[in-house]
Amino acid sequence: MDIVFTVQHPAHVHLFRNAIELLQEQGHTVHTFARKKDIVVDLLELYDVSYELLAGSSSSMSELAFQQAKYEFRIFKKALSINPDVMLAMSEPGVAHTSFILDCPSILFTDTEYAKLQNTLAFPFADRVCTPTCYQDSIGEKQVYYDGYHELAYLHPNRFTPDPDVLNGLDLEQDDSFTIVRLNAWNAAHFVGDAGFADIHDLIASLEETGTEVLITSEPDLPASLEEYTVDISLEKIHDLMYYADLLIGESATMASESAVLGTPAIFISTSRRGYTDELGDRYGLVYTFSGRDRQKAGIEKAITILNNAHTEKWSQRREKMLEDKIDTTEFILDQTQDVTSY
């Protein structure tokens, strides 16, 4: 088959990269199209995914609209020449529209309920919309549920084994206490009106009082006063680092979920919520979400409690319970790709 994948965010690369590799090993021709955002290109090259860049990054909503329009037009031109058997993407309007016009099956994945504009533009034109069972919106007959998370497409034990060597370059031992802080740039369309931390310096000072070492991973450039906390490791090592951390606290739902499925407790600070982070919290006790006006204060209090009462076994047991209930999401992607083209 000729199969098209599109990626517009680093998380999309991780979601699809194993499926892309396995489909190619099965003899299919895979075409991957990308829009330049954050470290998308770096990740595609790191994981040796052949790709074509169709649009650049954006720094404003008007520029984002322009880049998206250009991206959609170029996807259509590429698909017209390829005549693909199936197109897959993460809630991507361009793929939904193109596949609808060309009468080509399309499979969209989503786990973000409040990306209302994006979902409204994409879902009516897609053949299937695949969501985790914890997804809180109903999409209708085309919705296909699965017992998993996007992060289990690449962090399921079938796909990931942590490497303790990541600690060597940071002068850390496995018994050392360290906390990862994640900061967002807030420049995506679905982040409009959303917010996270109020005072990063206060957060760091409070964490350091517990004796933990603070490591920051940030989308925006950090001020000089915070540069000493920046994590200096290669891109492919961030999940290894998460695995050995005592805690992740941050503004990214994706990284909170990644941390949780690795068995490291996560605190998600954001005015918006997600079905998957809620479930990882309510059902498995691996994510704590704080979204109210006092979100930073409440998040710090929970962080201090976790760091002062380290129980590695407790988190491992909660992770094992979660893995018993959930599937390898890459296998689901492969099954859907085969199934939708069999009709």
Image (cartoon, rainbow, N blue to C red):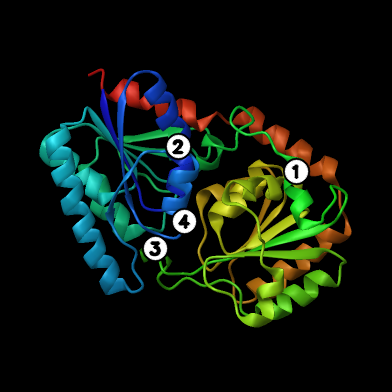
Horizontal placement of 196 versus 58: left or right?
A: right
SS of the residue at dot 1? Answer: helix
Please tell me whether residue 240 is drawn above or below residue 186 in the rendered image.
Answer: above
Give the spatial CA distance, label 4 vs label 3. Answer: 19 Å
Horizontal placement of 251 versus 267: left or right?
A: left
Amino acid at the residue labelled 3: His
Tell me the number on the disc at residue 274. Answer: none
SS of the residue at dot 2? Answer: helix
Q: Residue 104's spot in the image, x, y percent?
A: 18, 32
Q: Residue 216's spot in the image, x, y percent?
A: 66, 65
Dot 3 or dot 1, earlier in sequence: 1
Label 2: few (<14), some (14–19) or many (≥20) C-alpha neighbours in 10 Å:
many
Dot 4 or dot 3, earlier in sequence: 4
- Give the foreground label among 4 and 3: 4
Residue holding disc 1: 165
Residue holding disc 3: 190
Circle 3/circle 2 CB separation < 8 Å: no
SS of the residue at dot 3? Answer: helix
Dot 2 or dot 4, earlier in sequence: 2
Amino acid at the residue labelled 4: Ile
Tell me the number on the disc at residue 17. Answer: 2
Identity of the residue drawn at 75% across and 43% down: 165
Identity of the residue drawn at 64% across and 30% down: 157
Circle 3/circle 1 CB separation < 8 Å: no
Give the spatial CA distance, label 1 vs label 2. Answer: 23 Å
Dot 1 or dot 2, earlier in sequence: 2
Identity of the residue drawn at 40% across and 45% down: 110
Amino acid at the residue labelled 2: Arg
